[in-house]
Image (cartoon, helix red, strand yellow):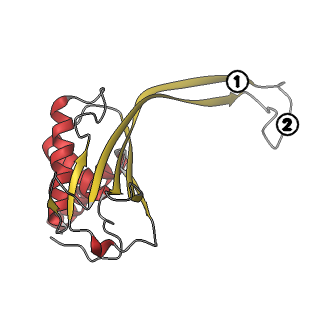
Amino acid sequence: MKKYLRISTLLLTAAYLISCGPSLKVSSDYDKSVNFDQYKTFALYRSDSIHDAISPLNQQRIVSAVKDEMVKKGFQENTSNPDVMVNITAILQNRVAVSSTTDYYGYGGMYRPYYWGGGMGTSSTNYNVQHYKDGSLIIDVIDANSKKLVWQGTGNKEIDKPVKDPDTVIPKAVASIMESFPPGKAKKS
């Protein structure tokens, strides 16, 4: 019984810690009139300029992860005559979150449902200011002939500290963003 209790406590603690971190919010959209079966090859569009605020090492990790995902999905890289162009854009913005809490104490008070003697209570308000970066990774798939956007995936995450293991985290994030590409097909592994 003690072993079961220890294992349960450990699992609950792990689940709590995982759920507390900022999570990647993923969305995608596509042109429903496009037949994605016609596309077999791809090339990256200006892969050298993802975003100046991202280190060159992380830029290369993102590019490699996108190429790997395209290959996993059955596409071949063809820089001379691709069916689709893949554009990668990263956006980092400094953000500020402000929250406040007000403590009411004393007898009565204007927000309490009762009032009885002792006068009005006093209050104090505390403001909490949090500075963080809001990061978005946008992956566009463009028909190479018509130059028309046919699919777009976006991942957004609050970045409160540097990534500990970018060689693992970045490919997982890219895989999550590209999970629904191409639309209507079962995942290929």
Q: Residue at the location (69% across, 30% down)?
A: 104
Residue position for label 2: 115
**On screen, 147 above or below 88?**
below
| Residue 188 position in % (x across, y down) | 18, 72
In which quarter of the view is residue 50 placed? Answer: top left
For marks 2 and 1, the one nearer the N-term is: 2
Report the residue marked by disc 1: 123
The three-letter amino acid code for the residue at tag 1 is Ser
Residue 6 seen anywhere in this rendered image of the structure: no
Amino acid type, residue under disc 2 in the picture? Tyr
**Going 34% across and 41% down the picture, which residue do you hit?**
89
Q: Is residue 183 left or right of residue 66?
A: right
Mark 2, secondary structure of its residue: loop
Mark 2 is surrounded, within 10 Å at the Cα level, by few (under 14), some (14 to 19) or many (20 or more) other residues, namely: few
Give the x, y percent position of residue 105. 69, 28
Task: Name the quadrant of the N terminus.
Answer: bottom left
The residue drawn where x is 22% and y is 58% is 82
Question: Considering depth in this image, is 167 or 111 the residue closer to the camera?
Answer: 167
Q: Give the residue at x 46% y 27%.
A: 130
Q: Position of residue 40 (x, y in %)?
A: 21, 68
Along the line of sight, which residue is nearer the eye, 101 or 175? 175
Figure quadrant of the C terminus: bottom left
Q: CA distance from mark 2 to mark 1?
A: 16 Å
Q: Is residue 157 above or below residue 52?
A: below
2 or 1: mark nearer the eye: 1
Q: Taking the image as drawn, is residue 51 in sight? A: yes
Helix, strand or loop for disc 1 = strand
Residue 139 horizontal/vertical position (percent): 33, 50
* 140, above or below 57, in the image: below
